[in-house]
Amino acid sequence: MVQGQRAAHAIASITLLTWPGVALAQRATENAVASSDDAFGTSVGLESTGIYSEGDTRGFSPVKAGNARIDGIYYDPIGNLSGRLRASTSIRVGPAAQDYPFNAPTGVVEYQFKPFPANTGMSLGYNFGAFGGSIRDSDLRLPILGGHVGLTGGIATADLQQSDGSHSTSHGIAFRPIIRFGRTEIAPFVSFSKYTTNYPHPLIVVSDHLPALPPKRHFLGQSWAKGAYDNNVAGITLKTPAFGNLSLRAGLFRAQGDRDSNFTEIFSIISSTDDASYRLIADPAQAIHSTSGEALAAYRVGNGRWNHRVLVGYRARNRYTESGGSEFRNFGTIRFGLPGPQAEPAFIFSPVNAGRVRQSSWMLGYLGALDGIGHLNLGVQKARYRATFRDGRTGQATTSHAAPWLYNATLTVELGKAFQLYAGTQRGLEDSGAAPENAANRNEQLPATLTRQYEGGVRYRFPGGQVVVSAFQITKPYFAFDSGLRFTESGGVRHRGIEASLSGRFLGQRLTVLLGGLLMQPRVQGEARDLGLVGERPAGTPSMVARLDANYRTAIFGGLTPTVSLVYTGRRAAGLRALTSLDGRQLMLRAYTTAEFGLRQQFKVGRVPASFRAVVQNAFDARTWKVVAANTLYPEERRRFSLSLAADF
């Protein structure tokens, strides 16, 4: 299978290389730091910057919350969008979302697709990844009929290796034809990815103490516990000025992530010992897919200093999730960290559970701007939520529903050309993700819940950069394990914090700096906390995060660029509740710092633009745990090296 993937990749690369008239630099100039306007989170290619990501923004996950957009259009994601389609990924939060229609409490993840190709070209990339892994990709840019029909897309294969020995192999292909007539653009796309091998992280369940971290690259799982799944997305987007001052933006998407097989291996540490209870959970084939989309019309009024836009739209999704049907195997007590090979058993699965979520919103919004004075962003939505869950063994079905009013309001005031003050609030109906792998209701879609946010801040622009300081408070329901190990709502959680970003170019544009920081007070509230069933700190959420990303372009070799990233992550709770054995405290993880050092160089091979980037991540080999859920961990990534090569033909 691997040889076949490599052969297909080589044949496609040769075909693209022989295409006539190629000329357009793309991959060789990718630089996430240079592409970032702030230190809140940007990803370009394999690089990421900022204190936030699509999985963690202000202590929550915008993707799990359902706040993903493709070129500004609502999208319900399952799995990841192909890098052959995406030009960048940005986190829209604070001032970056002040003019974003119908912005969301937990922030918005904006996937920007690659634009209409100006010239024929293709790019080849090869990443020599950590621990012998690799990523090989080819991208195509092809204008077919002048400025009327174009094509972007590509192919990729990947072998991703992790510090704890978990790994996956995959291959995929994606294409996006873009059709333009006048100022109207229609762009259908397809992306198919197959994960042929998936050994997930073994999970370590703890109670009142942390075990010693296993040696690097020491895989605790079974060689036969190999999962496989699909990650496919198809859709179409439409952007048109319609007529007069009326414009329309719409999209329809289908995402699918069916699991052919899936295994979870769990090591429950026995209190005060180095022994662990070892069990494995095998899942049958399970389907998961979602159809989602949005249509938004905007009517523009005004010119000169005073401009208005009135927005009317509709968005909806229909998600189907299968879970359960699993078989559990208990392999007894073992010495944690030592090899424990087991014979592969024959599994007999039971019928799967089926969950269905239907959610929609009618939307009415207003965006107004008075040049030199400020901006106003208002939105109201009437949402409708319906969920059903059918138990595969009993056939019993349960339903839930809601029809709340949602809103967003942001006011920005200009204080001269350099300063802006802003304040805003949002009320949203957001997803809660899925129950973790070691829950009794593992992989079950959790209900959507109401989330509220208040925020405000200041932005100061200076030549070459800007400073942003914001304060926020987010409240939403809190999910945790109950006495039966079901992952259910257990009160509420409040994140109150201050974030800051400095971004700019200095020293004659040679030095690019992104400096971000977050000080936050995450607190669990409600009856479950009052009864001592959960602690005051939500699991896995740090109270402080700081990150520095910097590039310095030297005159050596015409632009050799050293790069550095320093990330500080504060203390965070690993345990669910306060324990008497810990003097009434929750089990905590200590703060840690990681450092990344790299070199970047652009050059030419003949007339072909090319680049390399060498990086040592976690250079000082900081060792700690990653919190998946309360009392559930796996080792964070250790020191590793990667080398990326790219060429634009």
Image (tube, rainbow, N blue to C red):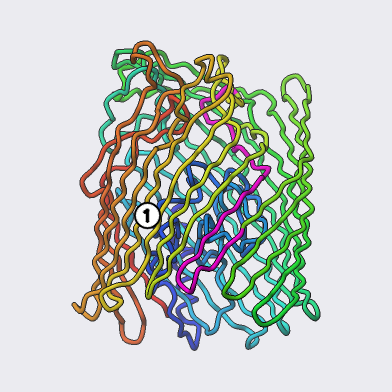
Q: Quadrant of residue 165?
A: top left
Q: Residue at x 34, y 34 (%)?
A: 571
Residue 613 pos. (x, y %)? 30, 65
Q: In this view, does 61 lie to the left or right of 648?
A: right
Q: In which quarter of the image is residue 151?
A: bottom right
Residue 629 pos. (x, y %)? 47, 30
Work out whether 111 lies above or below 80: below
Q: Residue at x 50, y 21 (%)?
A: 534
Residue 119 pos. (x, y %)? 52, 84
Identity of the residue furthest to the left in this view = 556
Q: Is residue 21 left or right of residue 129?
A: right
- Residue 396 appearing in the image: yes
- Residue 347 appearing in the image: no
User: Hey, what amino acid is under mark 1?
Assistant: Gly
Q: Residue at x 45, y 71 (%)?
A: 418
What range of the chain is rendered magenta?
411-440
Work out whether 547 lies above or below 633: below
